[in-house]
Image (cartoon, grey):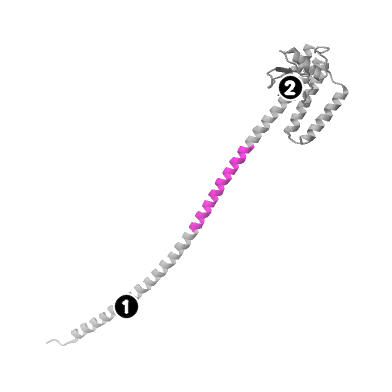
Amino acid sequence: MTLEQAIADDSFVRWDCPFAPQDQRKTRKLRQRLGHPPQEVQPPSQQVLDVVQRFIPSREWTEPSDGTLWRQNASTESASRLDSVMLQEMLDRKLFDERARATGVCPIRQRLYRECFDELLRQVAAESPERGILLLKVRHERECTISAYREILESRSGYAFRTALKGDKDTYIMQTRIAELKRRKQQLIEEEERLKDEEKQVRAEGEEQNRDDEKRRKDELGQLLKEAQLKKAQLEAITALPRK
Protein backbone atom coordinates (compact mmCIF):
# COMPACT_ATOMS: atom_id res chain seq x y z
CA MET A 1 0.00 0.00 0.00
CA THR A 2 1.07 3.57 -0.67
CA LEU A 3 -0.05 6.90 0.80
CA GLU A 4 -2.06 7.79 -2.29
CA GLN A 5 -3.82 4.41 -2.24
CA ALA A 6 -4.73 4.92 1.42
CA ILE A 7 -6.13 8.39 0.66
CA ALA A 8 -8.15 7.15 -2.32
CA ASP A 9 -9.39 4.04 -0.47
CA ASP A 10 -12.97 3.21 -1.44
CA SER A 11 -13.71 0.69 1.32
CA PHE A 12 -16.81 0.70 3.49
CA VAL A 13 -14.85 1.57 6.61
CA ARG A 14 -14.19 5.24 7.25
CA TRP A 15 -10.54 5.86 8.04
CA ASP A 16 -8.87 8.78 9.76
CA CYS A 17 -6.25 10.84 8.03
CA PRO A 18 -2.93 8.90 7.84
CA PHE A 19 -0.12 10.11 10.08
CA ALA A 20 3.61 9.51 10.33
CA PRO A 21 4.45 8.62 13.94
CA GLN A 22 8.10 9.47 13.41
CA ASP A 23 7.68 12.64 11.35
CA GLN A 24 5.11 15.17 12.59
CA ARG A 25 6.07 17.63 9.85
CA LYS A 26 4.92 15.26 7.10
CA THR A 27 1.74 14.59 9.05
CA ARG A 28 0.96 18.33 9.21
CA LYS A 29 1.72 18.77 5.52
CA LEU A 30 -0.60 15.90 4.61
CA ARG A 31 -3.41 17.21 6.78
CA GLN A 32 -2.96 20.63 5.21
CA ARG A 33 -3.06 19.14 1.70
CA LEU A 34 -6.25 17.24 2.49
CA GLY A 35 -7.91 20.29 4.10
CA HIS A 36 -7.81 18.97 7.68
CA PRO A 37 -6.84 21.04 10.70
CA PRO A 38 -3.15 20.84 11.63
CA GLN A 39 -4.12 18.56 14.50
CA GLU A 40 -7.27 16.82 15.64
CA VAL A 41 -9.66 19.23 17.33
CA GLN A 42 -10.83 16.57 19.78
CA PRO A 43 -8.63 13.49 20.27
CA PRO A 44 -10.58 10.22 20.11
CA SER A 45 -11.63 8.55 23.32
CA GLN A 46 -9.15 5.83 24.19
CA GLN A 47 -12.01 3.50 25.09
CA VAL A 48 -13.68 4.04 21.72
CA LEU A 49 -10.36 3.62 19.93
CA ASP A 50 -9.63 0.37 21.78
CA VAL A 51 -13.05 -1.05 20.92
CA VAL A 52 -12.80 -0.05 17.25
CA GLN A 53 -9.31 -1.51 16.90
CA ARG A 54 -10.52 -4.82 18.27
CA PHE A 55 -12.25 -5.54 14.95
CA ILE A 56 -10.60 -2.95 12.64
CA PRO A 57 -6.87 -2.95 13.42
CA SER A 58 -4.73 0.01 12.44
CA ARG A 59 -2.91 -0.40 9.16
CA GLU A 60 0.73 0.51 8.64
CA TRP A 61 2.93 0.71 5.59
CA THR A 62 6.26 2.11 4.50
CA GLU A 63 6.20 4.59 1.65
CA PRO A 64 8.37 3.16 -1.15
CA SER A 65 9.56 6.57 -2.32
CA ASP A 66 11.13 7.85 0.91
CA GLY A 67 10.82 4.99 3.43
CA THR A 68 8.47 6.93 5.72
CA LEU A 69 6.41 4.83 8.10
CA TRP A 70 2.72 5.74 7.94
CA ARG A 71 -0.14 4.61 10.13
CA GLN A 72 -3.89 4.94 9.77
CA ASN A 73 -6.63 4.22 12.29
CA ALA A 74 -10.28 3.58 11.69
CA SER A 75 -12.30 6.71 12.35
CA THR A 76 -13.88 7.12 15.76
CA GLU A 77 -16.32 9.79 14.59
CA SER A 78 -20.00 9.02 14.95
CA ALA A 79 -22.07 8.74 11.79
CA SER A 80 -24.99 10.87 10.71
CA ARG A 81 -28.15 9.78 8.97
CA LEU A 82 -26.62 10.86 5.68
CA ASP A 83 -23.62 8.61 6.33
CA SER A 84 -25.95 5.64 6.78
CA VAL A 85 -27.76 6.45 3.53
CA MET A 86 -24.46 6.78 1.68
CA LEU A 87 -23.29 3.46 3.17
CA GLN A 88 -26.44 1.77 1.84
CA GLU A 89 -25.88 3.28 -1.59
CA MET A 90 -22.24 2.16 -1.58
CA LEU A 91 -23.28 -1.38 -0.64
CA ASP A 92 -25.84 -1.53 -3.45
CA ARG A 93 -23.33 -0.12 -5.94
CA LYS A 94 -20.57 -2.58 -5.03
CA LEU A 95 -22.97 -5.52 -5.08
CA PHE A 96 -23.93 -4.50 -8.61
CA ASP A 97 -20.42 -3.66 -9.81
CA GLU A 98 -18.90 -6.91 -8.53
CA ARG A 99 -21.89 -8.93 -9.80
CA ALA A 100 -22.68 -10.52 -6.47
CA ARG A 101 -25.44 -13.13 -6.58
CA ALA A 102 -28.60 -12.16 -4.72
CA THR A 103 -29.32 -15.71 -3.53
CA GLY A 104 -27.40 -18.82 -2.63
CA VAL A 105 -23.81 -19.02 -1.42
CA CYS A 106 -21.86 -16.11 -2.86
CA PRO A 107 -18.37 -15.27 -1.50
CA ILE A 108 -18.50 -11.78 -3.04
CA ARG A 109 -21.79 -10.94 -1.31
CA GLN A 110 -20.53 -12.36 1.99
CA ARG A 111 -17.33 -10.29 1.81
CA LEU A 112 -19.15 -7.05 0.99
CA TYR A 113 -21.70 -7.52 3.76
CA ARG A 114 -18.92 -8.31 6.22
CA GLU A 115 -17.06 -5.11 5.31
CA CYS A 116 -20.29 -3.15 5.55
CA PHE A 117 -21.00 -4.68 8.96
CA ASP A 118 -17.54 -3.59 10.12
CA GLU A 119 -18.46 0.01 9.30
CA LEU A 120 -21.77 -0.36 11.14
CA LEU A 121 -19.87 -1.71 14.12
CA ARG A 122 -17.54 1.28 13.94
CA GLN A 123 -20.45 3.71 13.86
CA VAL A 124 -22.17 2.06 16.83
CA ALA A 125 -18.92 1.85 18.84
CA ALA A 126 -18.21 5.54 18.15
CA GLU A 127 -21.51 6.49 19.79
CA SER A 128 -21.46 3.86 22.55
CA PRO A 129 -18.47 1.57 23.16
CA GLU A 130 -20.66 -0.74 25.26
CA ARG A 131 -23.12 -1.28 22.39
CA GLY A 132 -20.20 -1.75 20.06
CA ILE A 133 -18.74 -4.50 22.27
CA LEU A 134 -22.15 -6.19 22.49
CA LEU A 135 -22.62 -6.02 18.73
CA LEU A 136 -19.09 -7.37 18.27
CA LYS A 137 -20.00 -10.37 20.43
CA VAL A 138 -23.12 -10.91 18.34
CA ARG A 139 -21.01 -10.85 15.15
CA HIS A 140 -18.48 -13.26 16.67
CA GLU A 141 -21.24 -15.68 17.66
CA ARG A 142 -22.72 -15.45 14.16
CA GLU A 143 -19.35 -16.19 12.57
CA CYS A 144 -18.81 -19.17 14.88
CA THR A 145 -22.24 -20.51 13.93
CA ILE A 146 -21.56 -20.05 10.22
CA SER A 147 -18.15 -21.69 10.62
CA ALA A 148 -19.73 -24.66 12.42
CA TYR A 149 -22.35 -25.02 9.69
CA ARG A 150 -19.62 -24.75 7.05
CA GLU A 151 -17.62 -27.53 8.71
CA ILE A 152 -20.73 -29.70 8.90
CA LEU A 153 -21.50 -29.00 5.25
CA GLU A 154 -17.94 -29.75 4.16
CA SER A 155 -17.92 -32.90 6.26
CA ARG A 156 -21.22 -34.10 4.82
CA SER A 157 -20.14 -33.08 1.33
CA GLY A 158 -16.89 -35.01 1.79
CA TYR A 159 -18.80 -38.03 3.06
CA ALA A 160 -21.26 -37.80 0.18
CA PHE A 161 -18.37 -37.45 -2.27
CA ARG A 162 -16.56 -40.44 -0.80
CA THR A 163 -19.79 -42.44 -0.80
CA ALA A 164 -20.39 -41.48 -4.42
CA LEU A 165 -16.84 -42.48 -5.34
CA LYS A 166 -17.24 -45.77 -3.48
CA GLY A 167 -20.58 -46.31 -5.20
CA ASP A 168 -19.00 -45.59 -8.57
CA LYS A 169 -16.15 -47.97 -7.76
CA ASP A 170 -18.55 -50.69 -6.60
CA THR A 171 -20.68 -50.10 -9.68
CA TYR A 172 -17.63 -50.39 -11.91
CA ILE A 173 -16.57 -53.60 -10.15
CA MET A 174 -20.06 -55.07 -10.48
CA GLN A 175 -20.32 -54.03 -14.12
CA THR A 176 -16.94 -55.62 -14.79
CA ARG A 177 -18.03 -58.75 -12.94
CA ILE A 178 -21.31 -58.87 -14.87
CA ALA A 179 -19.48 -58.46 -18.18
CA GLU A 180 -17.07 -61.25 -17.18
CA LEU A 181 -19.95 -63.54 -16.22
CA LYS A 182 -21.70 -62.78 -19.49
CA ARG A 183 -18.53 -63.69 -21.40
CA ARG A 184 -18.20 -66.85 -19.34
CA LYS A 185 -21.84 -67.69 -19.96
CA GLN A 186 -21.36 -67.25 -23.70
CA GLN A 187 -18.27 -69.46 -23.57
CA LEU A 188 -20.20 -72.16 -21.71
CA ILE A 189 -23.06 -71.94 -24.21
CA GLU A 190 -20.61 -72.34 -27.09
CA GLU A 191 -18.91 -75.22 -25.29
CA GLU A 192 -22.30 -76.83 -24.66
CA GLU A 193 -23.17 -76.57 -28.35
CA ARG A 194 -19.80 -78.02 -29.27
CA LEU A 195 -20.25 -80.92 -26.85
CA LYS A 196 -23.76 -81.53 -28.20
CA ASP A 197 -22.37 -81.69 -31.71
CA GLU A 198 -19.64 -84.07 -30.56
CA GLU A 199 -22.25 -86.15 -28.75
CA LYS A 200 -24.36 -86.38 -31.92
CA GLN A 201 -21.29 -87.32 -33.94
CA VAL A 202 -20.18 -89.94 -31.40
CA ARG A 203 -23.75 -91.27 -31.16
CA ALA A 204 -24.00 -91.50 -34.94
CA GLU A 205 -20.62 -93.18 -35.19
CA GLY A 206 -21.59 -95.58 -32.37
CA GLU A 207 -24.88 -96.46 -34.05
CA GLU A 208 -23.08 -97.03 -37.33
CA GLN A 209 -20.47 -99.16 -35.58
CA ASN A 210 -23.24 -101.13 -33.86
CA ARG A 211 -24.91 -101.76 -37.19
CA ASP A 212 -21.64 -102.91 -38.68
CA ASP A 213 -20.95 -105.15 -35.69
CA GLU A 214 -24.48 -106.54 -35.83
CA LYS A 215 -24.15 -107.27 -39.54
CA ARG A 216 -20.76 -108.88 -39.01
CA ARG A 217 -22.11 -111.06 -36.21
CA LYS A 218 -25.05 -112.10 -38.33
CA ASP A 219 -22.72 -112.93 -41.20
CA GLU A 220 -20.45 -114.91 -38.87
CA LEU A 221 -23.45 -116.63 -37.34
CA GLY A 222 -24.78 -117.53 -40.81
CA GLN A 223 -21.39 -118.82 -41.80
CA LEU A 224 -21.18 -120.88 -38.61
CA LEU A 225 -24.66 -122.27 -39.21
CA LYS A 226 -23.71 -123.25 -42.73
CA GLU A 227 -20.55 -124.94 -41.49
CA ALA A 228 -22.57 -126.68 -38.77
CA GLN A 229 -25.03 -127.95 -41.38
CA LEU A 230 -22.20 -129.10 -43.54
CA LYS A 231 -20.49 -130.86 -40.62
CA LYS A 232 -23.76 -132.40 -39.63
CA ALA A 233 -24.35 -133.70 -43.15
CA GLN A 234 -20.85 -135.11 -43.30
CA LEU A 235 -21.31 -136.76 -39.92
CA GLU A 236 -24.61 -138.25 -40.95
CA ALA A 237 -23.02 -139.49 -44.17
CA ILE A 238 -20.22 -141.15 -42.26
CA THR A 239 -22.53 -142.76 -39.79
CA ALA A 240 -24.75 -144.01 -42.61
CA LEU A 241 -21.96 -146.08 -44.34
CA PRO A 242 -22.28 -149.86 -43.84
CA ARG A 243 -19.73 -151.43 -41.56
CA LYS A 244 -17.49 -154.25 -42.90
Does residue 99 sit above or below 44 in this rendering? below
* Residue 222, image quadrant: bottom left
Q: Which of 104 and 15 is in front in this view?
A: 15
Q: Nearer the viewer, residue 1 or 23?
A: 23
61 magenta-colored? no
Work out whether residue 218 can be spotted: yes
Residue closest to the far left: 244
Residue at x 73% of width, y 17% of height: 71
Question: Where does the image place residue 87, in percent across and percent down from the top left?
Answer: 83, 27
Please name the amino acid that badge 1 sits on: Asp
Tell me, for residue 3, which label it has, or none.
2
Q: Is mark 1 on a helix, strand or loop?
A: helix
- Where are the magenta residues, as a range? 160-188
How many other residues sit within 10 Å of disc 1, few (<14), some (14-19) or many (≥20)? few
Q: Which of 132 and 220 is in front in this view?
A: 132
Work out whether residue 50 can be spotted: no
Mark closest to the chain's N terminus, 1 or 2: 2
Tell me, for residue 219, which label it has, or none.
1
Residue closest to the far right: 81
Q: Quadrant of the N terminus?
A: top right
